[in-house]
Amino acid sequence: MSQPTREVKVAIAGATGTVGQRFICLLAAHPYFRIASLNASPRSAGKAYKDVVRWKQSVPIPKLVLDMVVKTCEVDQFGDVDIVFSGLDSDVAGDVEEALRKAEYAVFSNAGNFRRDPLVPLVVPLVNPSHFAMIPHQKKTLGLEKGFIITNANCSTTGLAIPFHALEKAFGPLETVVVTTMQAISGAGYPGVPSLDILDNVVPYIGKEEEKIEWELAKILGGLSDDLTEFDMHSKHPMKVSAACNRVPVLDGHLECASVRFARRPPPSPQQVKDALRSFYCEVQKLGCPSAPQQAIVVHDAPDRPQPRLDRYHQEGACVHVGRVRECPVFDVKFAVLSNNVSIGAATSSIINAEYAVAKNIV
Amino acid sequence: MSQPTREVKVAIAGATGTVGQRFICLLAAHPYFRIASLNASPRSAGKAYKDVVRWKQSVPIPKLVLDMVVKTCEVDQFGDVDIVFSGLDSDVAGDVEEALRKAEYAVFSNAGNFRRDPLVPLVVPLVNPSHFAMIPHQKKTLGLEKGFIITNANCSTTGLAIPFHALEKAFGPLETVVVTTMQAISGAGYPGVPSLDILDNVVPYIGKEEEKIEWELAKILGGLSDDLTEFDMHSKHPMKVSAACNRVPVLDGHLECASVRFARRPPPSPQQVKDALRSFYCEVQKLGCPSAPQQAIVVHDAPDRPQPRLDRYHQEGACVHVGRVRECPVFDVKFAVLSNNVSIGAATSSIINAEYAVAKNIV
Amino acid sequence: MSQPTREVKVAIAGATGTVGQRFICLLAAHPYFRIASLNASPRSAGKAYKDVVRWKQSVPIPKLVLDMVVKTCEVDQFGDVDIVFSGLDSDVAGDVEEALRKAEYAVFSNAGNFRRDPLVPLVVPLVNPSHFAMIPHQKKTLGLEKGFIITNANCSTTGLAIPFHALEKAFGPLETVVVTTMQAISGAGYPGVPSLDILDNVVPYIGKEEEKIEWELAKILGGLSDDLTEFDMHSKHPMKVSAACNRVPVLDGHLECASVRFARRPPPSPQQVKDALRSFYCEVQKLGCPSAPQQAIVVHDAPDRPQPRLDRYHQEGACVHVGRVRECPVFDVKFAVLSNNVSIGAATSSIINAEYAVAKNIV
Amino acid sequence: MSQPTREVKVAIAGATGTVGQRFICLLAAHPYFRIASLNASPRSAGKAYKDVVRWKQSVPIPKLVLDMVVKTCEVDQFGDVDIVFSGLDSDVAGDVEEALRKAEYAVFSNAGNFRRDPLVPLVVPLVNPSHFAMIPHQKKTLGLEKGFIITNANCSTTGLAIPFHALEKAFGPLETVVVTTMQAISGAGYPGVPSLDILDNVVPYIGKEEEKIEWELAKILGGLSDDLTEFDMHSKHPMKVSAACNRVPVLDGHLECASVRFARRPPPSPQQVKDALRSFYCEVQKLGCPSAPQQAIVVHDAPDRPQPRLDRYHQEGACVHVGRVRECPVFDVKFAVLSNNVSIGAATSSIINAEYAVAKNIV
C-alpha cells in the first residue's frame, strides 16, 4: 500500500473505557492516524484525560493524550475528524453511532449494536474486507454522502473466523463446526467479572455469546449478493455451528477448541490443514495495512500450544494461533485456536478495518 | 444394605501421595473400613506418618494415622488386611498391584496401569458395578482364590460416564459424543503442574488424556459377554467419541462441555434429558453404600451452573453436576458436567467400589 | 455453659448479602438460635429467599430458608425475635441498626458504623467479651430497657487482636506493632474486587483499612473505666501500631505478618510466645459457647504455615493460626497470623458474641 | 557514555534455564553485546538451542539463537568471549564460575554463590557500581589478569536497595527497616512453585530469603575501606533490618511494604522522601548504559499503586516503583516498592553491571 500522504484525524468515542484505552495505546504510535478527539460521558467532559480515566493498561498512558480535554459524545463535539473509532458500551453505542453516521462520519465500531444490521458490514479485517463493497448501498439507502458504520465481530467469533476462512479458501465450505471457548476476563470489560466469581473457578456461561458465534460466523464467512446489497449468510453452503462458551481466570486471550467437518470428501488431512493455515495470506496484508500482522495465522507444532500467557502478545496480538491440529474421531479435523481478545478480537480489528478503508479510498 | 457386622481392615498403598492422602481423609471417618496399614516408598518406611507426609489437604491429618508407622509396598508388609486401596503412581503401581493380587489381596486401584487389561473391570461405581461379575473369570484365569484387581476410571472419564450412563439407561445408546474438558490442577498430582505454566493461563493439552476418555467410555458404558469373560466395549452400538482436554487454573473440579447424539430418533428433548438425569438412581445407592451420594446427578437450572468452586464439594464431591442442558444445533443435546476429580473422580470411586464388593460378599 | 433451655429466635438483617449468607449457613445448624426472620432491601421483600438471593457459598442454601419470605428492614418487620444479626452494608446499617436498638432489639452487627461509638462495645469474642459490661450504661444513656448494639471488629483487626490479647495476658502490654496484611477478596464483599484488578496482582491499598487496624486494636485490647462507662483505649500503656494493608488473589483468609515489641524487658523468647499462644484459653470457651473453637490459637511449627488455603477452614474458621514465631532483628518477636475473614473475622464473631450474651443472660 | 566502538562478545552460562532465557531476550537486541556462546548442561550440548530449551517467555525465541549449537559449561567451551553472564543454578554455579574466573573470564553472575565472598562485589547497578573498585584487589589476591566475578543481588534485596540508597544519599543513613515482601512465583525459577501450593494461597515462607535481605542490604548500601580491599557492611551506621517474606500468586513483580527510620532527626517528611526518590539519578544513567532506565525510581501518587500487573513492565522492568509514601506511626515513613524480579531483580542488573564495566574499561 502506498501509505496516505496526509495524517488522518480520528476520534475515539468511549475513550475512557477499556476498549477506548486500547484504541489509545494502539493509535498513539500509529504511522498516520492522529488522535484529534477523545469523547466520553458528560461526567468526564471538560477535564484532562489523565484526570478522568481509570487507566488499566500495563503500559503508561501515552503522553500525547495525558492532557487532552475530553469531550462529550454529542455529535457536534467530534470536530473535523475523518474517522470515529467507537469503544462505547452497547447501552449507548446505538444512538451515538447512528447520530455520528447521520452527521457524515465514518464510524468503525467495536460495539455489538449494528452487527446484525442488514446494511452494516461485520468485518474481520483478515477475512472479509470485501464486505466494504456494501457501503455504497448503506450510504445510498440512508441518503448519506460519507457517513457509514462498519463493525468488527465479537471477540470470540473473530478468533474462529480467521482460521475457518483460511480453511474455506483452501478446501471449500465447512459444513459443521463444534466449538468450546475458554474466554478471558478482559472480554467482559471493567469492572466486568467479580473476582469472587472467577478465582479458582470456571463459569460455563457467557450471556448471548454462543448465539453470537453461531450467527456472526455465517455473516462473516458468507459473501454478498451480486448487486452488493445483501449478505448471503453462507446460505449457498449452510454451516451448522454449535458453541459452548466459558469464562476462565485468564486476563487476556481466548482459547477455543474446535472440531470441523468439510463439505469436501475426502477431507484434507491434518497436515494439509496446517499447511493451508500457515500459508494463509490476506488482502490487508497485501495492502500493507500497518496494523496487520506479518503472519496472520501462527501454526504451532508443539503439542501444548497455543497458550494464552505465552502467545497472546505475539505480533502485538494481531494474529491468531492454531495448534494441536489432529484428526477428529467424529468430524474431520480438530484444533485449538488462540486469539487476543483485546487486540485482534477488538480494537486492532477496528483499526485495520480503517486502514483498509484508507488504502481503498473509502474514507 | 445390611452393613457388615465386622470392621473390614484396609491398607493404603501410596499413602503419602496426593491420592493416598485423600484415601486417608475418606477412610478415617468410614463406618466400617478401618485403616490397618499405610504403605509407601522405602524412603518413608519405618517412620511415623506425620513425619514423612507432605500433607496438602485443607483438613488436618486425621488423628488416628498421625503416628502410624509407614511400611514399604513389599507384599509381605500388608499384613492381614482384606482390601488394599492403591493410590500409587503408575510407574510403580503395575508391579506392586500385580504382586498384591498374586498374594490374594483384593486390590482397588486408582492407578491407570490395569485399566485396559482384558481381565480387569474398569468400574465407575455409579455406572457399572455389574462388571464385578468378571472377577470370577479373573481369579480363575490367574489361578487365584481371593486376589483380584479392580480399577476405577480416569478422573475426566468418570465425570462423563455417569450422565452418559443415565442417558443410555433412559433413552438407549449414544451414537456420538464431542467433549471439551477444563480440568483442575489437582488432577496432575503433586508437585504436578508448575505454577508458572498455569497462572493466568490455560494449557490445551494433557498427555494421553483424550485417548483415555475416548477408550475408557466404551469399556465402562459397554456390557459383558454372556459368559462373563469379555468386555463388549459398547460394540453393539459403536459410539464415536472426540475429546479435547485442557488444564485450567482451578484447584479441584473438572468441568466438561459435551454435545451428544442419540441413536434413537427423534431424540429426547432437553427437558426429558434433565428429568432422566435427575431421576437417575443406581445400584450402589440402592445397596446403601455409605460413600455413595444421595443424589447421583444434581441437575442445575441456573444458567451459569455448575461451577467448580461452588459445586465441587456438594455431597462430599461424590456426585456429578449437570447444567445448561439445551439443544445442540449440530447434535441433539449439549450440557456442562462438573465432577470432583479428587473425590468421585478418584478415591471416592475406589471406596464405593469396595463398599459394593463388601455388600455383595465379593471380599 | 448450661445451654439455654429454649430456642432463641433471631433475625438476619441484610440476609441476601455475602455476610448475610454466612450468617444463614452458620445459624441453620445452630443448636439453639432459630432463624425466624430474613430481612433485606425492599427489592427482595415479599419473595422467597431462594428466588432473590445470588447465593455464592460453596454449600447449597440450607433447606429451611429456601422458601422463607424475605421482609424489609423496616423496624416493624422483625417480629418477636430476641436478637438481630446485622450483615448490612455500612451505607444503610447505621439507620437500620439505630432504629432496631430503639425498638428494643439486641443488635449484633458486623457493620462498621458503630465501632467507634463511645457507647458501643467493639467485641472480638475470644478477646474482650468483658466489654459487654458497658451495655447497662449504653441502655441507660439511651433510655432503653433491652435494646443495645454490639459490633464485632473489622476482619483484619480480629485476626491480630486474638494473638495480641493472648500475648498481653501472658507477658503484659505490647508497646509497638508493625503489621503488613495480605487480605482475601471476600473481605470486600460481592461484587467487590473486579477480577481484572486482582488476577496475577496484588493491590497495596484497602481504603481506610490501616486506620481501622490502628484504632480498633486500642479499643479492643484496652479495658473499661472503673465505673464501666468508658473505653480506656489501652491508654495506660499506649501502643504504637503501624499497618500496611494489601489485597491478594486469595478467596478466603487474611494472612498478616506482625512484628511486636513488649513493654517488659527482657521480652519473652519465641518459644515462650508459642507456649503462651498455644495455652490461651478464653471466657467464651470456658462458657462452652457452641460456636467458639476448641483451640483458639493454633500454633504451627512447620516453617511454611499457616497458609490460607490449607488452614482457613480448620475448626470452621473460628480460630486463628500463628506460625513462623521467631526473633525479630528490630523488635522482639515476629510471626504470621492467619484468620478466616468470613468466619471468625465476621459472622462467627457476631454469633459467638450472641452466644456469650445468652450465656450471661444479657439477652 | 561513548558506546564501545566494537561489539563485545558474550557467553550465557545456563542458557536454557529461566534466567538464561531472560539473558537471551535482553541481549538479542543489545546495541553492542553479541551472544557468541550458549552454554548449558551436557544433556543439551551439541544440539540446536531451539531443540533443547523449554521456552517459557511471552515473546518468541529470538531468531539469532534458534539454531545456535549449545555447548557445555566446561571452561574450554566458552571460546573467545569477553564476558560470561551466568544464569546457572546455585548447585553448579560455584564451580563453573570459579573455573571461568580462573580462566580469565569476566563473570557477571546472577547466582547467589559468591554474594557473601569478601572479594566479590555484590552490585545493584543503580546503587553501588562504585564497588567495582574492589576488582583489582580480587584479581591481585587470586593472581589473575582479567578474570573476576561480579554478582548482582537477590531479587527481593534489589527492589529495596534502590530506594534505600536514594534515601540515604538524600537524607543520610537509615537506622531501622522493617519490610514484608510479597514475591512473584517467577522468583523461584522453573518448575519452581507447584501450582497446588500457590493458587488461591499465600505461602509465608521463602527459604533463606529473609536472611538474604537482612545481610545483603548491608553489603550493598555500605562502602569500601579506604584501601579498596574490604566491604564496610554499613558498619559506620549500623542498620537493623527485619524482613518477612511471602510468596504470592503473581507471575512477575515483587511488591514490598517497608517502614524506615532515619538516623537524622527530625526525619524528612513524606513529601521530601517522594521528591528525593523522584529526583534520584545515578552513575549508570549518567554513563548512558543502554539498559539503564531513564527514570530509576518511578514515584506514584495514586493511592493504590504500584501494582505488579500494571507497573512491572514499565521501562522494560529496569526501574523500581514506589508508592503510598506516608508517615509511619512507629518509624518515620512507610511506602510500597515494586520491582520486576526477572528484570532489574535479575538479568537486567547483570547486564547493566557489564555495561558499566565496559564503559569504565574494566572489561
Image: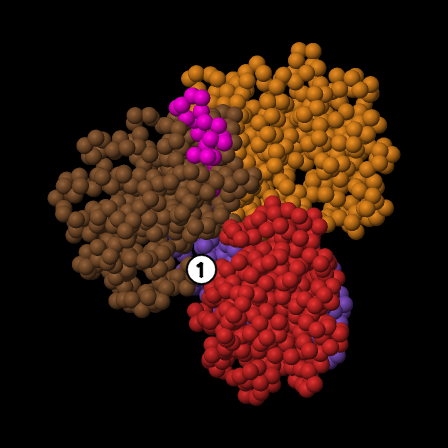
Chain colours: A red, B purple, C orange, D brown
Residue D179 shown in magenta: no
Question: At 82% across and 20% down in the image, what residue appears?
Answer: C145
For the image shown, how many numbered marks are present on the structure?
A: 1
User: Is any atom of residue D3 visible in this view?
Assistant: yes
Identify the residue at the far bottom of this view: A265
Question: At 81% across and 46% down in the image, what residue appears?
Answer: C44
Query: Label 1 sits on what residue type?
Result: Ser
Residue carrying label 1: D58
Residue D256 shown in magenta: yes
What residue span does the magenta drawing correspond to? D255-276
> Percent position (x, y) of residue D20?
33, 56
Q: Chain of mark 1?
A: D
Secondary element type, mark 1: loop
> Percent position (x, y) of residue D102?
16, 49
Identify the residue at the far top of this view: C226
Q: Report which quarter residue B52 is drawn in.
A: top left
User: Is any atom of residue C272 visible in this view?
Assistant: no
Quarter holding the C terminus of chain C is: top right
Q: Nearer the viewer, residue B331 or B1?
A: B331
- Is A230 drawn above or below residue B360 in the view shown? below
- Is B56 drawn above or below residue B323 in the view shown? above
